Image (cartoon, helix red, strand yellow):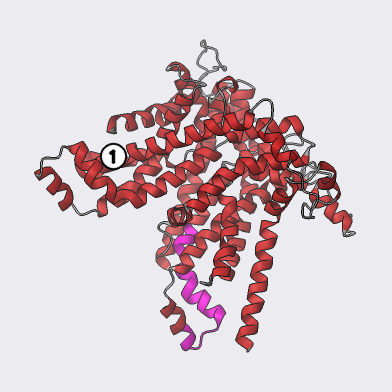
Amino acid sequence: MVGPGSAAYLLFVLLPIGLSLFQSFTDRRYLQSSYSFVGLKNYLDLIGDEGFQQSVVRTFWMTAIVLVLPMVGGLLVALLLDIDRPVYRLLRSFFFIPIVLSPVVVSFIWAVILTDKGVLNSVLDAVGLHTIAASWLGSATLAPISVAVVTAWQMTGFTATIFLAALQGVPEELRAASRIDGASSYQTFRYVVWPLLAPAVTINVVLVTISALKLYDYAVVLTNGGPGTSSETMTMHVVSTTFTNGQNGLGAAQSLVVLLLITIVTVVLLKALQRREVDL
Amino acid sequence: MNRRAGSIGRLIIAVAATAAFSFPLYIAVVNAFKTNESVVQSPLALPIDGTLSNVLGVLTDPSGFYWRSLGTSLVLTAACATLITGVAAMLAYYLARRAGRWGSAVLVVLLIGLMIPQALILGGVSDVLRGVGLMGTPAGLVLFNLGYFLPFAVFLFHGFVKALPRDTEEAAVIDGAGPLRSFWQVVFPQLRPAAASVVVFVAVFVWNDFITPLILLSPSTGTTITVGVYRAIGTYNVDYGGVYATMLLAAIPMVLFYLLLQKQFIKGLTAGTSK
């Protein structure tokens, strides 16, 4: 049993990375067995590849939206619902439900809300706010923002649940002591509770950032990267280079660059947040 | 008096915030039971003139996509969850107790695989699967998931194994139990909390996964519910009631699974978050 486990990992995780590295130096095309070595050509091509670069930059600012909304929203929700009563326990489970839904289901639910003649625009019309009504998924400016906000909605359920668990781990005596010492509720939060939430902040920031950087399902269902390529993420770009255009060599180079970017961001974030945990 | 007013105010804000957050879920549920005209005319209203025709339409679709993909998803999810839990528990135990210095070296190699997005290695994965003749088959998907989720599951079990006392295992060996028997009858039962977390996590990921079955399974050999939903929606895109009924039916198995195992879900998700 030890053997098969390690073998599956070697065959289906490490070997594919090795293959990508190898293929990134070739001009291999999908399902073709003959290819020749092209050296660093695929990597050099990326320097002038605007479509790829734009998808990388776009993914990073979409990640900022996907990170900020759930961190702030999730913390506020957790603070609001951190009371041990049946009613509040019931409310909490509503925030958990989106976590078990697949991003595909979540995106379809939102697609019917955000589409041009969808629920949101018809509600805005009905209450006389038709000036705000917009093409949420059909305009090049709004589409990537809408994709990020839908992703952020599902992530908020996740961050709120993590923050709630951490809040329940804060000993009641600490809060009581702080109150007796005359601290305001803001001071109690800032100097007693917030430092104890540091590990939850670390987990939330790292997991949400990784999920956002590999954003794929939401964008495919909501906009399919469009209009044009205005909401195409870097993962989508790699997949379409490799599978749609059949350029395995170029796709492999792109996937390794994206993998390197995600690894760097994750390691830097993790180190910074863990240092912060020690300092607090 | 003042305190009481404060707590009622807080409850009102809490209910309002939850209602606002759950608004998309409300929309999805009520509109699954409406005719298409009333979805367009009054999307917010409760389904007073409720109809089951959307739901029945999906359940009795002549292509049978719902039942077939539901079956595929159930089998694939169960196979992945069982296999990954069993293999990862044994590997973690071996690394923690038997492998010596090798153990930590293997853990470092496993660490590499912990945060690789599936989408970025699927090009290479499909080459490997084609090489061993498993591309487009459920077995290939299960084997890929075994390798892909192994690092996460091994790390979770590893922490648990290290915290176990050694005396029970030693007693089992003295009583003449072989290594396999002493693992399954003595060690594994003590790892149950970790196993529950791994099962829950892997099940949710495999059930909801989109890109892996989209690329690794071929439409002819059947597909999962998540990909099935994606392919089916394209065919009746303007039938909002039908879309929501499909969503509802695709989501129900996971929501039931969560309601049944609510405690394990929260515990598994929040392990290691409090200082």
Closer to the camera in the image, A111 or B236: B236
**Image vertical order of residue B267 relative to residue B124, above or below:** below
**Image vertical order of residue A211 relative to residue B26, above or below:** above
**Image vertical order of residue B188 relative to residue A123, above or below:** above
What amino acid type should be assigned to the residue bearing mark 1? Met
Q: Position of residue A187 (x, y in %)?
A: 53, 80
Residue in view at x 23 percent, y 38 percent: B102
- Asked if one can make out residue A225 in the rendered structure from this viewpoint, the answer is no
Identify the element where label 1 is drawn: helix
Q: On the picture, is A56 further left or further right than A190?
A: right
Q: Position of residue A170 (x, y in %)?
A: 44, 71
Closer to the camera in the image, B192 or A139: B192
* Badge count: 1
**Residue denoted by label 1:** B90
Our reading of the magenta stretch's main secondary structure is helix
Q: Kindly indicate the quadrant of the structure image that contains residue B26.
A: bottom right
Q: On the picture, is A215 further left or further right than B38?
A: left
Q: On the picture, is B25 further left or further right than B160?
A: right
Closer to the camera in the image, B72 or A169: B72
Residue in view at x 41 percent, y 33 percent: B146
Q: Position of residue A240 (x, y in %)?
A: 63, 28
- The answer to whether residue A195 is magenta is yes
Give the residues drawn in magenta, as a range.
A178-202
Quadrant in the picture for the C terminus of chain B = bottom left
Crowding around mark 1 (Cα neighbors within 10 Å: few <14, some 14 to 19, many 20+) is many
Q: Position of residue A27 (x, y in %)?
A: 55, 17
Quadrant in the picture for the N terminus of chain B = bottom right
Could you tell me which chain the residue with mark 1 belongs to?
Answer: B
